[in-house]
Image: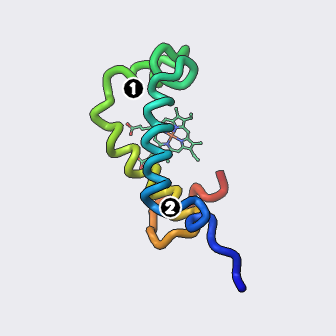
Amino acid sequence: MTEPSLYDRLGGAFAIAAVIDHFSDAVVRNPIAGQGSKDPELDEWSRNDLGRLPGLKFMRTLWVCDISGGPQVSRLSWLRGC
Ligand code: HEM
């Protein structure tokens, strides 16, 4: 019997999307990687580019679904080595 994929063990796309949603909001509020970051581009993005956040959540979800063995295909698969 083959072991279930990481995607299945995580609970599939809906569970992954819920975690990405929560994580992405937390990163925006985080003073190291988000608002208040010493990196001016991260600080700027987290304050003034939040209209891009839903799209970023979508891409992060798609990518994690892909690399964890789900049926979704992301063109960011080349990031598998990260
Ligand atoms: C806490 C660490 C990280 C932060 C704060 C962060 C932040 C961001 C932000 C704000 C964007 C959106 C830029 C835009 O408006 O288009 C972005 C995009 C992206 N990030 Fe990250 N990132 C992090 C970690 C990573 C890591 C570890 C990887 C690689 C494994 C990665 C790969 C990418 C890629 C490929 C995109 C572009 C997606 C696309 O436009 O298709 N990031 N990141």
Residues packed near mark 2 inside 10 Å, few (<14), some (14 to 19) or many (20 plus): many
The percent position of residue 11, horizontal first and vertical second, equals: 53, 61
Q: Which mark is residue 65?
A: 2
In three-dimensional space, the C-alpha distance between marks 1 and 2, rounded to whole angstroms, equals 25 Å
Among the 4 quarters of the image, the one containing residue 49? top left
The percent position of residue 15, horizontal first and vertical second, equals: 48, 55
Q: Which mark is residue 58?
A: none
Mark 2: which secondary structure? helix
- Above or below, 23 against 30 in this view is below
Whether residues under marks 1 and 2 lie with C-beta atoms below 8 angstroms apart, the answer is no
Q: Residue, x 32% and y 42% (percent of image)?
A: 54
Mark 2 residue CB less than 8 A from any atom of ligand 1? no
Q: Which mark is residue 45?
A: 1
Q: Residue, x 38% and y 50% (percent of image)?
A: 58
Which badge, 1 or 2, comes first in the chain's sequence? 1
Q: Residue, x 35% and y 37% (percent of image)?
A: 53
Instruction: Report the residue that reaches farthest toward the bottom.
Output: 1
Q: Residue, x 53% and y 17% (percent of image)?
A: 31
The percent position of residue 77, horizontal first and vertical second, equals: 53, 62
Amino acid at dot 1: Trp
Residues packed near mark 1 inside 10 Å, few (<14), some (14 to 19) or many (20 plus): some
Mark 1: which secondary structure? helix
Query: In what quadrant of the picture does the N terminus appear?
Result: bottom right
